[in-house]
Amino acid sequence: MLKNLHLFIRSVLIAIIDSFYPLFKRFMPLQTFRYAACGGGNQVLNIFIYFISYNFILKKEIIHLPFIAISPHIAAWLIAFMITTPIGFYLSFAVVFNGSYLKKRIQLFRYFAVVMICILLNYMFMKLFVEHLHWYPTISFIITNVLVTAFSYLSQRNFSFRQKKP
């Protein structure tokens, strides 16, 4: 039953995404397009969940736990992260890199490891560009996103969801 649901969801997502591919065929291979579509959609969902969590669920208030207080912007990020990371993994293994020979638990561990590195890279690049090079934050954010997305794509393709060479 779950396998049938997975196959149905996968086929619908691929059909929808691939229907837009002819517009981008000249610019990128299909796998890169699928990665951009899935990652972009997941990023939009991430921002939406962050916004709703921060403004309406947490109401911009500090979360007081027994041993720590968490600021609302960090708590909202954690909520969004916990929802979109599994979705991102599913989209990556089911839609983008669906030919991997690795076991799902290995893919999940590697995916999460790459995500953690990406979080660290985001932090380091933003610190470097804004605080040390004194670049505008928006430009720094755009450049950081390009660099981290390129790293993430190559890492997921060649490490997390490795496929046998033809």
Image (tube, grey):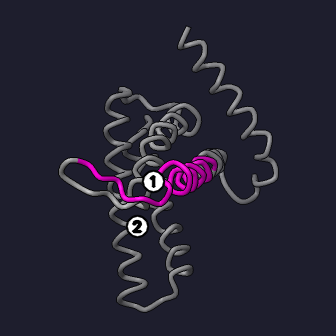
Q: Residue furthest top?
A: 1
Q: Nearer the viewer, residue 71 or 31?
A: 71
Q: Residue at x 60, y 52 (%)?
A: 48
Magenta region includes residue 58: yes
Task: Identify which residue is drawn at 74% across, 32% down.
Answer: 15
Residue 60 x %, y %: 47, 60
Question: In this rendering, would 148 be left or right of 33?
Answer: left
* Distance from the alpha carbon under mark 1 to that under mark 2: 17 Å
Q: Residues within 10 Å of mark 1 (few under 14, many from 20)?
A: many
Assign a secondary structure to mark 1.
Answer: helix
Mark identifier at residue 76: 1
What is the quadrant of the N terminus in the image?
A: top right
Q: Going from the N terminus, do you reach mark 1 or mark 2 first?
A: 1
Residue at 55% x, 37% y: name it: 91
The amino acid sitting under disc 2 is Asn
Q: Does residue 90 show up? A: yes
Q: Nearer the viewer, residue 31 or 13?
A: 13
Dominant secondary structure, magenta: helix
The type of residue carrying mark 1 is: Ala
Determine if residue 154 is in view.
no
Q: Residue 129 in the image: x percent, y percent?
A: 42, 83
Q: Which mark is residue 92?
A: none
Q: Position of residue 97 (x, y in %)?
A: 52, 38
Q: Residue 42 placed where, x, y %? A: 58, 47
According to the picture, the residue beneath numbered tag 2 turns out to be: 122
Q: Quadrant of residue 7?
A: top right
**Which span of residues is magenta-colored?**
41-65
Q: Secondary structure at mark 2?
A: helix
Note whether 103 is above or below 71 in the view shown: above
